[in-house]
Image: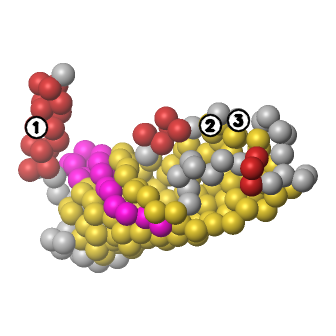
Amino acid sequence: MKKIALLILGGLISLQVFSQSTEKNVLKFNPLSLILSTGTVFYERKIDDFQSLQLGVSYTGIKIDDLKYQGIIITPEYRRYLKGNALSGTYFAPYLRYQRFNLTNTDSKSEATFSSIGGGLLIGRQWIYDSGISLDIFAGPSYSSGSFEYKDGGSSSDFDTNWGVEGFGIRVGLAVGFGL
């Protein structure tokens, strides 16, 4: 298993030697978010050699124990690339995040709406290869604060909010896409 991981890593590094980014746009998706029944799409647009803007949109519909939630996440992001090769290189990215979920407790049949706003700061690395394929990995701290609106007599005891959408956290991701 270690040999396979090293072979893949070596292949990605060697591809980087031959990559040249002439693209002005990148369309990406996060394949890891599918594990959480979430679809995430990103659109990144180059502003100049050092800067880009990205917009991420996610839709989720997941059930954790007796809590079912579905909703949308919108994440605008500003990226500052370090080496003057926007869309391909190491970057810092402050971002904002808006989330809105409809929650249902399947045991008590109570419902609520949860909305939050937050943000954070990422450090990441994106590669765009000669083929146009892009690979973007990123991580960083986040914070989010939100509120509940209970329906049908629901209360906070019906909704365990320890599922990571409020408070301090870490945003980690991987996006694969194509430069345009």
What colour scheme was applied to this rendering of the protein? secondary structure
- Residue at the outermost top position: 1
State the extent of the magenta-drawn residues as a range.
Answer: 127-143
Q: Which numbered marker is on residue 64?
A: 2
Q: Is residue 33 above or below residue 167?
A: above
Q: Which numbered marker is on residue 20?
A: none
Q: Is residue 70 visible?
A: no
Quadrant showing the N terminus: top left
Residue 110 drawn at (x, y percent): 84, 45
Residue 76 drawn at (x, y percent): 49, 69
Q: Which residue is mark 3?
A: 66
Q: Is residue 48 above or below residue 176?
A: below
Q: Which residue is mark 1?
A: 10
Residue 66 drawn at (x, y percent): 70, 35
- Judged from the image, the secondary structure of the residue bearing numbered disc 2 is strand
The residues tagged by marks 1 and 2 sit, at their Cα atoms, a distance apart of: 38 Å
Nearer the camera: disc 1 or disc 3? 3
Residue 87 drawn at (x, y percent): 28, 63
The residues tagged by marks 3 and 2 sit, at their Cα atoms, a distance apart of: 6 Å
Residue type at mark 2? Ile
